[in-house]
Amino acid sequence: MSSAPLTATTAPPSARATDASRIDANRRLVRGWLAIVLFTLFSLVLVGGATRLTESGLSITEWKPIHGALPPLSVAEWEEEFALYKQIPQYQQLNKGMSLDEFKTIFWWEWGHRLLARSIGVIFALPLLFFWVTGRIERRIRLPLVGLLALGGFQGFIGWWMVSSGLADRVSVSQYRLAVHLTIACSIFAATVWIMRGLTPQAVDAAASPARHRMAAVIGCFALFQIYLGALVAGLDAGLTYNTWPLMDGAIIPGDLFIQQPWWINLFENVKTVQFVHRLGGYTLFALALIHMIAALRTAPGSVHTRRAVILFCLVTLQAALGITTLLLEVPIGWALAHQGGALVVLGFAVAHWRGFVGEYARPGAMTAG
């Protein structure tokens, strides 16, 4: 008589324990790799913010994905780069008479930003290939990881598309393109958090209500939208105007918000309107996090997802304080970068919080390797 083949449920307990141990070990390795990716992405966004705040983003006027990895190595090469910069409006209208040493300062910011962007491709692609070939990547996350790699490559093109907007008729990059560039970067960051959180053991706790699950999703998505609004503010240097709070231009709701025609263009090009909408976005995110926390405390005090809701509200509150301080101090670079970093922290935690609810409602077997 032939015996039936062993399955996941009929295999000896020792074999099942070995498989579970192997899966856990693989997940720890992949989580460690994704943590490094997240740290590099965080650094990349902050360096990108510093590049913008120091007005360094247009210092490299050509897109050389391979050759551009090497900086100028001789005086002649530095002079060549400087000569290219002298041809664009930013130099001619804002920085005319800049010395070569001054040019080097802004050049290194942009070169460092591009070097980090290139590095993240290597940090992501090579381990992904190794883990895939050695069978450490679970089937359910293979396509999302490949999608992230493709999106990262596309982000490189978007970065050049943004820079090119400031090389001909402008002295800075387009706020529209800056917002797209930053939002894609933050989307990659959020997606990486989502995948990494899905590989993390879920706490055994009472299931949260679907309403709080939906609210967590809303907060995560709105945190990303608020970053988009902040990018419009940055692209227009809108934070350098109306540096009072809670009043703006002497009123709670300032005038002339829709002075340009058509009316909707004010949402993207009117400095006052763009800053006011970003303020409204901050108030909205604060209110959403507060409502979410109160609902959690009322219905499931002491639960893991309630503690996450409290932490999320604290992070949103801290981020609001950073934003207000940055505005009142007229955007010093240190405070501005703290505010930008805080936005990433809020986004990352909000997404991890949301993913925690998804894990609690995952179908049987969803967390197994395959």
Image (cartoon, helix red, strand yellow):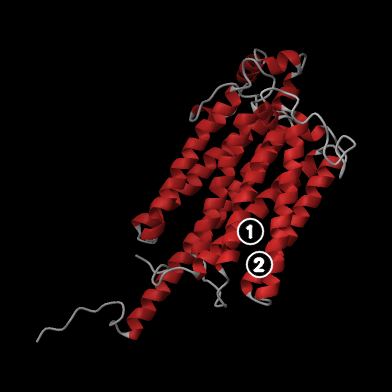
Which of the two residues, 100 or 179, is positioned nearer the viewer here?
179
Q: Is residue 109 above or below residue 119?
A: above
In terms of image quadrants, where is residue 264? top right
Q: Classify the position of the N terminus by image quarter.
A: bottom left
Q: Is residue 43 above or below residue 12?
A: above
Which residue carries the number 2 mark?
308
Which of the two residues, 73 or 135, is positioned nearer the viewer here?
135
> How would you rate the neighbour count of disc 2 (Cα within 10 Å): few for under 14, some for 14-19, many for 20 or more?
some
Regarding mark 1 in the picture, which secondary structure is present there?
A: helix
The outermost residue toward the right is 250
> What's under tag 2, amino acid-wise?
Arg
The first of marks 1 and 2 along the sequence is 2
User: Which residue is painted at 70% across and 29% down in the image?
Assistant: 266
> How would you rate the neighbour count of disc 1 (Cα within 10 Å): few for under 14, some for 14-19, many for 20 or more?
many
Would residue 181 be seen by someone viewing this image from the given angle?
Answer: yes
User: Is the residue under label 2 in contact with that under label 1 (CB below 8 Å)?
Assistant: yes
Q: Position of residue 297 (x, y in %)?
A: 70, 72
Which of the two residues, 270 or 159, is positioned nearer the viewer here?
270
Which residue carries the number 1 mark?
349
User: Which residue is painted at 77% across and 14% down in the image?
Assistant: 97
In the figure, is residue 250 to the left or right of 13?
A: right
